[in-house]
Structure formats: C-alpha cells, structure tokens
Amino acid sequence: MKKILFTSLFLFSFAITFAGGYRVGLQGQRALAMGHTGVAYVNSAEIAFFNPAGLVYLENKINVSAGGFGVFSDVAWQNTSTGQYSSTDSPAGTPFYVYGSYALNERLSLGLAIYTPYGSGVEWPTDWAGSHLVNNIDLAAIYIQPLVSFKISDKFSVGGGPIFVTGSVNFNRNADRTLTDLEGNRSNITVDDSGVTNWGWSVGAMFNVSDNFTLGANYRSEIILKSTEGTATFANFPDSPLVPANGDTSFTASLPLPAELTVGATYEREKWAFNVDYTRTYWDVYEDLDIVFGNGRESINPRNYKNSSLYKFGVAYEASEKFSLRAGYYFDESPVRSGYFAPETPRNDGNGFTAGLSYQVSNSFAIDASFLYLRFKEIDESYDYVSDGSSFGGTYKSSAFVPGIGLTYKM
C-alpha cells in the first residue's frame, strides 16, 4: 500500500449551523428577533447586511448598529444497532456584526458592514466512534463590505458593494479507525490556516409600493476560499513506509461560500410591522472538498450539496415610546443529500423560533436583545463515502439556543 486515502477531512465547516450547510444566520438583533427577516424593512443600520438599497431611506444622517451572539449548541449521536452514544462539548460561538451609514444627501448614502456569516466550533470526545471523520474544529470568517445606496426615485433605490473575506480554521481528526503508534496513541492529522482571503460582491433593490408596503431583493455572490499556505501536522503515526511520516507539511484546498438570493416584503400599519422573506442558497456549487497534502497524500471528500430554501416570518410591535417587541419563525431546509451526512455538519431541516425587544434609552441610543431557539429534525443518516469503502452513520439529534445583545445609535 503506497498511498493512504484519508477518510473525510472536513475543512472550513462545523457542527451546529444555520441557514443551511455551514452558514451562520446571525446578522442583527432586530432582524433575528423577527425571524432573521429584513430585506424590505428599514429599521436600523442592520439593513446594511439585509439590503443595502435601504440605507438611503434611514431618517438620520448617521446610523450605527453593533452587537454579538452566544451560540450554545448540542449534538447527540447514537448507533442504534450497537448502542454506541456520543455528544459534543462545543465551545460557545460568538458571531458579531458592526454596521454604519452616513447620508451624503437625500439620494445618496454610504455604508460599511462587518459581520461573521461563517464561524463556530465543535468538539467531540476523544476517540469517539466517528473520530476518523472529525474530533474538533474551530472556524472563523469575517466579511468586510463598503456600501453605496442610491435613491433613483422616491419609491425605488439600489445599493451594494464589494465584499472582502478573511478566514481561519483549525481542524483535527484521527487518521482512521485503528491506526496508532507504539504507545497506543491514535494517529491523527491537524490542519491549520489563517489569513485566507478573497473577494465577492452584493447588490440590492428596494421598491416602496405605498406608504405601508415595501418590496425588497438582495443578491450576495459566491466566494471561493482557497487555502494554499496552511500547515498540516501528522502525529502519532507508526514508523512505516506504508503511512505518512510524522511532522508538518503543506496542503491545498478550497471551499465555496455559496451565492444567495433573498426576496421579501414588509407591511407596516400604525404600531405594527410584518415581514416575509424567502432566501434561496445555491449550495450545488459545493460538489466536493478534495485536499492535496505536500507529502503526496490526498483526501477525496464528495459533498454533492443541493440548493436549499429558507422561509422566514416576523412581526414587530411598538408597545410604548421606550419598548419595541418582536417575534418570528423560520423554516430552514438542509442542503445535505442522503448518504452525505457527516458529523461535522450533523443537521437536518430546522425550525427556528425567535423573539426580542428594544429599549430606547434616549432619542439617539437604544439597546437591542434577541433570542433564537433552533431545533433540527431528528434524523437517521450516514456518510457513505469513507475512503476505505465503509460507511459511518447513526441517529443525530441537534439543537441550539442563541441569546444576543446589541446597540443602536443614530443622530
């Protein structure tokens, strides 16, 4: 045996995910509280992410929104045939956002959006049954986007701008189910990279049908992250010409961050606002995740994702001059096909329940809070493309709760 095809090295992905695949749908307190809607809702600088065309409709010259979330996830796996059981002990993820806008005049506004649509971590117990697929992973990706918003008429506006992405990853898994060194330590591989960058873009449009009814659309482009300067570390391999030598080597891999299109509507009447959004994510670009190591080894990892949809609903109520209340719901389709279900993304279709409020401290300053409970449908699935010809599967049960807090400023 001159070459080992390593089983499923999953780079740039993580356990509990939102909005399909490895996408994290946490880009604003007010929006999340309303089911993560907002493509047609001009309420704060959060519109910079959801639809930059709306920046020009903000009433104030300067608008800023900033905040963060704590992601507390739980994943349980069991092989019902053998009774084997395991669950994750994942650290809390901390996605964040910062948005700002400045109105140059009545028809033109500039903006800046900084947000983390990809980023979390997972840690399975040492030597669990699926350790040949994943032990632990830590992922972070930051989007930085300058924006322009232009009002073509009193009813119609457009907006958008380039996106700069920088990301990092640290990932570890065992080499296979049984391989060890002389001391019995499991052979394992760790990949690490940071400063992976690329560019994309987004564009949006907003149409005010009437004083109460608004339509919006926003498109965010596909971005490919290519890792070419990271380090792969091979550890605890036996001294044999049939397996890799211990030590560091290079690796190359790429991961698509898929394009997505969101359309939606907002209806406002007196103290109420109602949002409906639909997002289509073009996951079919994620066909595989093949990795080539500098020592001549490689990892072949088919993915074969399918395009998926996200259906979102939200409502807001101005209870008083100081308090605004919000609630929402969304249904999130999984892009993972049967037979491609892996423990680094152990999720199925999900139901998200959201709520939140804002407290107006002064005319310029408000405190925003939100909460998400996400429950994935229990599923009995497998990954059938392990390189040794075997399959790894079981029953997965996943959920997460996500509290968040943020600040809104305007002047």
Image (cartoon, helix red, strand yellow):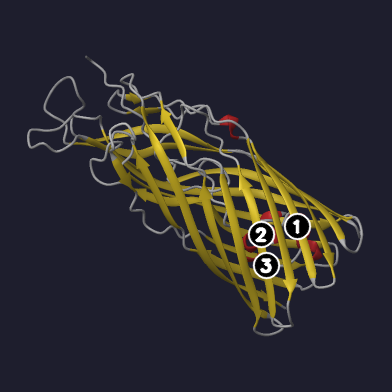
Give coordinates of residue 273: x percent, y percent.
78, 65
Residue that extends furthest to the bottom in the rendered view of this protein: 362
Q: Is residue 24 visible?
A: yes
* Badge 3 density bin: few <14, some 14–19, many ≥20, Cα 10 Å: many
Q: How crowded is the residue under tag 1: few (<14 C-alpha within 10 Å), some, or many (20+)?
A: many
Between the residue at mark 2 and the residue at mark 3, the CA separation in whole angstroms equals 7 Å
Element under label 1? strand
The residue lying toward the viewer, choosing from 179 and 84, is 84
- Cβ–Cβ below 8 Å for labels 3 and 1? no
Are the residues flagged by discs 2 and 3 in contact, CB closer than 8 Å? yes
Check disc 2: other Cα within 10 Å, few if <14, some if 14-19, many if 20+: many
Q: Quadrant of residue 84?
A: top left
Q: Is residue 385 left or right of residue 182?
A: right
Asked if residue 102 is positioned above or below residue 36 in the image, the reply reads: below
Find numbered disc 3 in the image and state the secondary structure of the residue it sits on. Answer: strand
What residue is shown at x 36% (from left), y 53% (from top)? 90
User: Is mark 2 in CB contact (under 8 Å) with mark 1?
Assistant: yes
State the quadrant of the C terminus: bottom right
Residue drawn at x 26%, y 18% as measured from the top left: 3
How far apart in space, not on screen, are marks 3 and 1 (Cα)? 11 Å
Q: Earlier in the sequence, mark 2 or mark 1?
A: 1
Quarter-of-image position of residue 47: bottom right
Q: List x then y, in percent, for residue 318.
A: 74, 75
At label 3, the amino acid type is Arg
At 30% from the left and 20% from the top, the residue drawn is 388
The kind of residue on which mark 1 rests is Asn
Name the residue that disc number 1 marks: 275
Q: Which residue is mark 3?
A: 326
The label shown at residue 328 is 2
